[in-house]
Image (cartoon, rainbow, N blue to C red):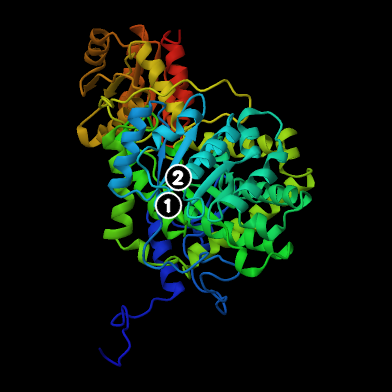
């Protein structure tokens, strides 16, 4: 122990913003001609990014003026957490949905014996049958392991089955969990009308028979699965919660009691900072609702169940999902979620295996116990970046929530298509970013595998036809594309590499990776005369060729090679780079297109299938 204060980086001079800006300009202007250099405002504009729903990400954050009061966990506005973590971490909640009773019961007992602390059972025609709930829970002690149920078409049956099992245990006063009543969530999926009259009976049931359990869930995963951004997820969460409280108050239940019956289920994804900020902002927003409704301050905290987003899970290169799940789990924990579910890495393939469940469970155990995340409350608090994101999210989500309220509330906004319309705007922007790879997906749209490893799972039961918000994973457009290319026999796109490897190497690698996104075969020829290249293309049976090299080589060889290829019957000749590099007025007559960073890879791949006559 010492009385001397620890000075982190105390031996180094503190750089000024002006020094940082000077270094930024040095990098960005390195290859720009004299007189064309960027100003610092132009440089900052280039480094600044905007998310799909309008959040601004600055290249550098610093303290401007006097710091805002950071506040404390467990008190208004609950941004930093509903409580101070006692050191035990969070509730590790395992999801089970396999309709095979014996398989699910064995998996449940395995999870609870090996680190999971609670259970989440999905009930329905494509999951566990409500009547089977006592059998799948055989051997589980309800006073030790919390149990929550959820369903789309069978919410009341699921809640009744869980309540009956709790009563039969003789531990009604000790059980913890959730009855899973969420009529708006069901309406969002099915497209039907929401019956809010079911809320009060189950809230009263929980309050009288199961004092430690909760009756309601505000499940925003349906909106995340349908493409909602961070703002829309929060707005839908708050609007749904307000709608439930409003309906309960109309049935004679106080707002305070209503607050105590709600749990928010929130997606966590691989963008760790927006996930952290999302959880913090939701608590702040819900606390504000409680303040307006005169809910006692101590009861305004929002309990949150963070679930790693199914929308980010990929079918292809599935093992990369382990990394995505780890980041999302970390973000959910740092963001202060009381409950966390990590989806198995093979979730896009089917029902999980024992190994994938183990990996999902141990991801949380390592984070909570070995990494000690469970011992820290709001470690991101005070970060200028996280606080800025939290403020932006809270402000934008509140404005979106007010739009839903102006439309008549969440139930009417869903029924009238207002929610779907707002989600469609975000989906359109994200689709553009995914297709151009501005929003990359590792292993799918970037650095894909040529041969996919086998992932052996049991298929999921077919889900009923539903008319509500349709789920779609971000990677699905690329996976569908790859399936179409495979079904067409993996047509060949030939790479004609001009000059020496130092000339064509970088663009050959870029182009082959881009074509591998769709699964095209890419035979190639390096160097040689136009006649030699034509001979290689003919021998390969390729009808489309991409020229790969540097601008200097293109100026000498692109036109002669492309002309020879067209004369030999090649349907299309593309250039890796931009046509302007060729420096010839003939370029448009023999070069049909360009391969470059930022192009629409999906549109190009589909057009290539059409051009090669393989679309059908």
Pick whichever, 541 or 473, lies toward us.
473
The quadrant in which residue 522 appears is top left
Could you tell me which quadrant the C terminus lies in?
A: top left
Q: Does residue 360 lie above or below 210 as drawn? A: above
Q: For mark 1, what is the residue? A: 143
Q: Residues within 10 Å of mark 2 (few under 14, many from 20)?
A: few
Disc 2 to disc 1: CB gap under 8 Å: yes
The quadrant in which residue 107 appears is top left
Determine whether the residue tagged by mark 1 lies in a helix, strand or loop: loop
Residue 132 image label? none
Q: Position of residue 85 (x, y in %)?
A: 43, 66
Q: Residue at x 58, y 39 (%)?
A: 223
Going from N to C along the chain, the mark reached first, 2 or 1, is: 1
Q: Position of residue 115 (x, y in %)?
A: 30, 50
Q: Residues within 10 Å of mark 1 (few under 14, many from 20)?
A: some
Pick whichever, 255 or 187, lies toward us.
255
Image position of 188 (left or right of 74): right
The answer to whether one can see residue 46 in this image is yes
Q: Nearer the viewer, mark 2 or mark 1?
A: 2
Q: Position of residue 123 (x, y in %)?
A: 50, 32
Q: Residue at x 72, y 54 (%)?
A: 253
- Most extreme residue toward the bottom is 3
Q: For mark 2, what is the residue? A: 169
**Whole-number angstrom distance, CA of label 2 to CA of label 1:** 9 Å
Q: Position of residue 259 (x, y in %)?
A: 64, 57
The answer to whether one can see residue 551 in this image is no
Q: Residue at x 27, y 12 (%)?
A: 537
């Amino acid at each position: 122990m010492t009385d001397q204060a620890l000075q982190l980086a105390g031996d180094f001079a503190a750089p000024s913003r002006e020094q940082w800006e000077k270094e930024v300009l040095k990098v960005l202007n390195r290859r720009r001609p004299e007189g064309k250099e960027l100003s610092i405002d132009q440089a900052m504009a280039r480094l600044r990014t905007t998310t799909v729903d309008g959040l601004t990400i600055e290249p550098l954050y610093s303290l401007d003026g006097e710091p805002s009061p950071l506040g404390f966990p467990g008190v208004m506005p609950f941004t930093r957490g509903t409580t101070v973590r006692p050191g035990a971490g969070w509730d590790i909640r395992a999801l089970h949905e396999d309709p095979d009773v014996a398989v699910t019961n064995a998996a449940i007992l395995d999870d609870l014996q090996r680190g999971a602390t609670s259970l989440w059972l999905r009930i329905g025609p494509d999951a566990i049958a409500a009547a089977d709930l006592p059998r799948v829970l055989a051997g589980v002690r309800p006073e030790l392991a919390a149990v929550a149920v959820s369903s789309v078409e069978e919410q009341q049956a699921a809640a009744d089955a869980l309540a009956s099992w709790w009563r039969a245990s003789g531990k009604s006063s000790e059980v913890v969990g959730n009855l899973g009543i969420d009529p708006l969530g069901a309406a969002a999926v099915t497209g039907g009308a929401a019956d809010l009259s079911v809320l009060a009976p189950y809230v009263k049931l929980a309050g009288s028979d199961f004092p430690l359990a909760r009756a309601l869930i505000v499940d925003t995963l349906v909106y995340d699965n349908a493409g909602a951004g961070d703002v829309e997820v929060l707005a839908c969460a708050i609007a749904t919660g307000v709608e439930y409280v409003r309906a309960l108050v109309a049935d004679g239940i106080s707002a305070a009691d209503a607050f105590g019956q709600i749990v928010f289920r929130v997606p966590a994804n691989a963008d760790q900072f927006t996930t952290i900020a999302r959880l913090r902002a939701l608590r702040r927003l819900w606390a504000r609702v409680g303040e307006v409704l005169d809910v006692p301050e101590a009861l305004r905290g929002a309990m949150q169940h963070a679930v790693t987003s199914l929308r980010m899970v990929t079918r292809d290169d599935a093992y990369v999902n382990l990394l995505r799940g780890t980041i999302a789990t970390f973000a959910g924990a740092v963001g202060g979620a009381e409950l966390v579910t990590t989806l198995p890495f093979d979730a896009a393939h089917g029902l999980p295996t024992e190994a994938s469940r183990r990996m999902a469970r141990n991801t949380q155990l390592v984070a909570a116990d070995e990494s000690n995340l469970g011992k820290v409350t709001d470690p991101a608090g005070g970060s200028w970046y996280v606080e800025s994101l939290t403020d932006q999210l809270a402000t934008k989500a509140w404005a979106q929530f007010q739009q839903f309220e102006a439309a008549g509330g969440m139930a009417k906004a869903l029924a009238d298509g207002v929610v779907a319309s707002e989600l469609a705007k975000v989906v359109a922007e994200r689709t553009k970013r995914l297709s151009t790879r501005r929003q990359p997906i590792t292993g799918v749209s970037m650095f894909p595998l040529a041969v996919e490893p086998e992932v052996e799972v049991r298929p999921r039961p077919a889900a009923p036809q539903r008319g509500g918000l349709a789920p779609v994973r971000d990677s699905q457009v690329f996976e569908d594309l790859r399936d179409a290319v495979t079904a067409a026999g993996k047509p060949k796109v030939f790479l004609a590499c001009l000059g020496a490897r130092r000339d064509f190497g970088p663009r050959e690698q870029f182009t082959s990776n881009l074509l591998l996104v769709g699964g095209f075969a890419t035979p190639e020829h390096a160097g040689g005369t136009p006649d030699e290249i034509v001979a290689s293309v003919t021998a390969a049976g390729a009808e489309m060729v991409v020229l790969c090299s540097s601008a200097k080589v293109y100026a000498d060889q692109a036109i002669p090679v492309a002309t020879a290829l067209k004369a030999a019957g090649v349907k299309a000749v593309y250039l890796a780079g931009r046509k302007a590099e060729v420096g010839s007025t003939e370029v448009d007559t023999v070069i049909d297109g360009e391969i470059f960073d930022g192009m629409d890879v999906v549109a190009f791949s589909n057009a290539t299938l059409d051009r090669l006559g393989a679309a059908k």
